[in-house]
Amino acid sequence: MGHTSELRRQLVLLRENDEGARERLIEHTCDRLRKLTRKMLRAYPGVRRWAETDDVLQNSMLRLHRSLAEVRPESPRQYYGLAATQIRRELLDLAKHYFGSEGPGANHHSDGGALAECKPDEAAEPETAEAWERFHGQVDGLPADEREVVLLVWYEGLSQPEAASVLGVSLATVKRRWQAARLRLSESLEDWSLE
């Protein structure tokens, strides 16, 4: 059974109040969430010094598990949106925790100052919690169809054909929406763009 088909089946069981559906849903999407966590954590070099991928992933999964007790996504699209929101919140909370005014990383440079000098690769991504919040705000402000594609392709790490399957649209439609979202975001976020 394919990834999306199994996800749909588990979502039905969740809505029917199957006791183990939350755990099975999270287990089924664990690898995708791990990839997303690793990808986003690379853009937080300071947080990466204090937290490992699996720590961030575990806390994100706990958030998702709690959310699924109250929220019953009706489609893979809604589920992925909820999962992306939870991992995004965890990363932002960690950045605030470690680099807030009282955070342990705010004035700690055991790297000999190299961290302050290092620049992200040329596909420049936000470097601060505030910049990430601005980015996420811009994503949240996209038209719904473009936002869904960004959530699936960029946050969740699905391929464009996989996103087309989840959304029930053609690959050409996903490509068009992805391009439109990238253009819209690059206009409002001059310092970096989606790759």
Image (spheres, helix red, strand yellow):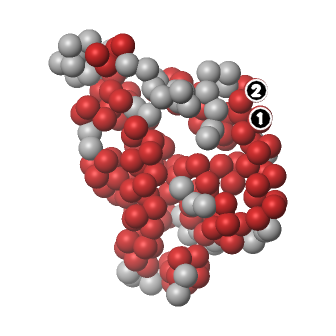
Task: Name the image quarter holding residue 118.
Answer: top left
Between 108 and 183, the residue placed more toward the observer is 183
* Residue located farthest toward the front when viewing the structure as drawn: 122
**Measuring 44% from the left and 45% from the top, which residue is drawn there?**
39
Please identify the residue farthest to the bottom as the structure is shown. 1
Residue 43: x percent and y percent? 44, 34
83 up-or-down from 40: above or below? below
Residue 51: image tag? none
At 27% from the left and 49% from the top, the residue drawn is 55
How far across and how far down the image is residue 23, in percent? 37, 73
Residue visible at 33% across and 27% down in the picture: 46
Q: Is residue 114 visible?
A: yes
109 displayed left or right of 69? left
Q: Residue furthest left?
A: 110
**Label 1 is placed on what type of residue?**
Arg
Look at the numbered disc 2 and give the secondary structure of its residue: helix
CB of mark 1 within 8 Å of CB of mark 2? yes
Q: Secondary structure at mark 1?
A: helix
**x, y percent for residue 144:** 76, 50
Number of other residues with Cα within 10 Å of mark 2, as a class: few under 14, some 14 to 19, many 20 or more: few
Q: Is residue 130 left or right of residue 74?
A: left
Above or below — where is 24 with respect to 36?
A: below
Type of amino acid at the residue the image marks with label 2 = Glu
Give the answer, above or below, for where 102 lies relative to 82: above
Using the image as rendered, state which of residue 82 and residue 52 is in the foreground.
52
Q: Which mark is residue 184?
A: 1
Residue at 69% x, 72% y: name it.
165
Q: Nearer the viewer, residue 131 or 22?
A: 131
- What mark, if any, has residue 187 been given in the picture? 2
Quarter of the image for the C terminus: give it: top right
Q: Position of residue 180 (x, y in %)?
A: 80, 43
Neighbourhood count class around disc 1 (C-alpha, 10 Å): few under 14, some 14–19, many 20 upward:
some
